Amino acid sequence: MIRLAIIGIIALLISTEAAAEQKIQVGEFEIHYTAFPSLLVPADTANLHGLTRAENRLLLNLSVRRIGEPVPARVTGQVVNILNQAQPLTFFEVSEQTAIYYLAEVVNQEKDWLRFTLEIEFSKDHPPYVLEFNRQYY
């Protein structure tokens, strides 16, 4: 059931231009990430994972892969709005046989410009990677 829920989320992400997935290559690791309005998540899927669907909520989704296989990671970070107000991000892991996802909820205001800073630890042999990106939400 969880697998179907996550597949549903990913299908929504891939099919929605506003929630276009991004990918960064860090050595042999691929980091996939996206942030999108929580209302795009079906209500039953949100309930299953304890997510809040609301106009002022975003969902951040991140995964790490190496040679096509999921890699466990430790993800921390924060998001800062245009008024320089910081909000820590609390990620939780969703693990499946073929995938591991890290999800965090973000409270945002209408027409907000957000600056995300994430620190991703995915290997003892590799220093943590800092990922920074911006998003504007209408």
Image (spheres, rainbow, N blue to C red):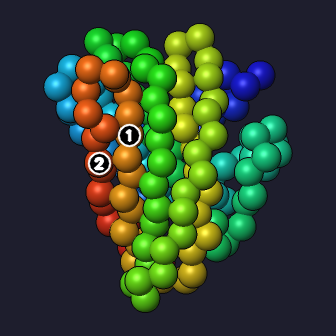
Q: Nearer the viewer, residue 78 or 1?
A: 78
Q: Are marks 2 and 1 in contact (CB under 8 Å)?
A: yes
Q: Which residue position is annotated with label 2? A: 130
Q: Residue at x 43, y 49 (%)?
A: 34
Q: Which residue position is annotated with label 1? A: 120
Quadrant in the rendering for residue 39? bottom right
Q: Residue furthest left?
A: 27
Q: Residue at x 32, y 66 (%)?
A: 134
Q: Nearer the viewer, residue 47 or 72?
A: 72
Task: Left or right? Give the position of 108 relative to 52.
Answer: left
Report the quarter where the N terminus lies: top right
Amino acid at circle 2: Val
Residues under labels 2 and 1: Cα distance? 6 Å
The image shows a total of numbered marks equal to 2
Task: Left or right? Give the position of 67 relative to 91.
Answer: left
Residue 129: x, y in percent?
28, 41
Q: Residue at x 66, y 72 (%)?
A: 55
Give the SS element for disc 1.
strand
Residue 74, above or below 54 = above
Q: Is residue 137 visible?
A: no
Residue 23: x, y in percent?
29, 39
Q: Residue at x 41, y 83 (%)?
A: 84
Residue 68: x, y in percent?
34, 14
Residue 25: x, y in percent?
21, 33
Residue 17, above or below 57 = above
Among numbered discs 2 and 1, the one appearing first in the sequence: 1
Q: Is residue 83 visible?
A: yes
Q: Nearer the viewer, residue 94 or 53?
A: 94
Query: Where residue 59 is drawn, which disc sits there?
Result: none
Task: Left or right? Give the position of 109 relative to 25.
Answer: right
